[in-house]
């Protein structure tokens, strides 16, 4: 170990030779010593034997820059720029006695540079890192073979479906499929326990089923839309023609409650699709505020079988 001031002093031949040897020794040993050299220069090396760190004087000759430990290891270091590991070099993390390690490694071929930005805080227990497809990572809840809880929206891609395996692991599953929506749709499940009925199966309902009564607005011509409801109501305010409904589907049935005007008796006629017993359309009750009930069943897209129940009170 040697340190020197970097200046060869004048003197006798032997003194100058000794001073030169001292300066060279300081250079060859990187000014090693437990304390910093008394005289320093910009970019001067110093092997700090007290801290076991190899240092370099900064360009302003005002402070030391720590480079690495004297045994060649980096120890705890802060890097201000990028670190590149070439040719699939590993980023390794050793265990407590450094006998084994885990590592990250780049793929053999990369088409273009990719940067992933880590989230700014830790996630919840069981969450995993998820990408937004643009390099930003965030914590997301994942479903595993043993189950899991999703706290946000669960989105299944355009070609995906939701498949349920039965109690027997075999080739038979139940799959929920979605018709391509033309706008955002929401299906709300009831707050109850029960069985979901299917259109293709006969149903035995264990509770009452009710149809909303849709109000028809009185006018000289009223055209019900049978896609809106099964049951309707109308209060006569005109001489009304109940025209052929739109969206007729064979098998639909229901009622239309007809309330007579409270001040002037009105009449009602019917479109050609309305078929009555004997082929004669009935007359609504003329008593003011009287209520009639038109019971109907759709036979075809051009025929509605109907019966008028009059003056109900």
Image (cartoon, rainbow, N blue to C red):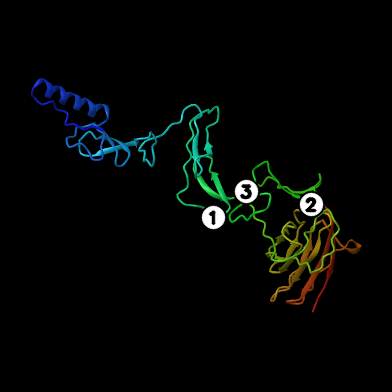
Residue at image mark 1: 124
Image vertical order of residue 212 relative to residue 116, above or below:
below
Mark positioned earlier in the residue sequence (3 or 1): 1
Image vertical order of residue 123 relative to residue 36, above or below:
below
Quadrant of the rendered image containing residue 109:
top right
C-alpha span from label 3 to label 1: 20 Å
In contact (CB < 8 Å): disc 2 and disc 3: no
Mark positioned earlier in the residue sequence (1 or 2): 1
Q: Nearer the viewer, mark 2 or mark 3?
A: 2
Residue 273 rendering spot, x and y as whole percentages: 82, 56
Residue projecting furthest to the top: 13
In the displayed structure image, the side of residue 149 where residue 198 appears, left or right = right
| Residue shown at 35% from the left, 36% from the top | 68
Residue at image mark 2: 166
C-alpha span from label 2 to label 3: 23 Å
What element does badge 2 sit on?
loop
Residue nearest the viewer, comparing 313 with 185: 185
Residue at image mark 3: 155
């Amino acid at each position: 170990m040697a340190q020197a001031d970097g200046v060869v002093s004048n003197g006798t031949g032997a003194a100058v030779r000794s001073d030169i040897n001292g300066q060279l020794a300081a250079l060859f040993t990187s000014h090693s010593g437990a304390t910093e050299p008394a005289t320093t220069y910009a970019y001067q090396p110093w092997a700090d034997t007290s801290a076991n760190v190899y240092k370099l004087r900064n360009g302003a000759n005002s402070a030391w820059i720590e480079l690495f430990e004297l045994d060649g290891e980096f120890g705890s270091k802060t890097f201000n720029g990028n670190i590149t590991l070439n040719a699939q070099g590993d980023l390794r993390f050793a265990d407590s006695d450094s006998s084994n390690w885990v590592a990250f490694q780049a793929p053999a071929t990369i088409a273009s540079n990719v940067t992933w930005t880590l989230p700014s805080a830790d996630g919840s227990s069981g969450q995993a890192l998820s990408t937004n497809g643009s390099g930003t990572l965030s914590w997301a809840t994942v479903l595993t073979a043993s189950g899991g809880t999703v706290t946000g929206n669960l989105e299944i891609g355009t070609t995906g479906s939701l498949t349920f395996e039965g109690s027997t692991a075999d080739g038979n599953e139940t799959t929920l499929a979605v018709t391509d929506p033309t706008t955002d749709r929401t299906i709300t499940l009831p707050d109850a326990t029960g069985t979901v009925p299917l259109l293709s199966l006969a149903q035995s309902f264990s509770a009452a089923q009710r149809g909303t009564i849709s109000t028809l607005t009185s006018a000289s011509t009223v055209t019900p839309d049978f896609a809106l409801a099964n049951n309707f109501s109308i209060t006569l305010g005109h001489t009304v023609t109940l025209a052929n409904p739109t969206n007729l589907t064979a098998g639909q049935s229901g009622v239309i409650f007809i309330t007579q005007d409270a001040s002037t008796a009105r009449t009602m006629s019917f479109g050609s699709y309305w078929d009555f017993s004997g082929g004669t359309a009935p007359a609504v009750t003329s008593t003011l505020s009287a209520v009639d009930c038109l019971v109907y069943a759709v036979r075809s897209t051009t025929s509605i079988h109907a019966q008028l129940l009059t003056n109900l009170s």
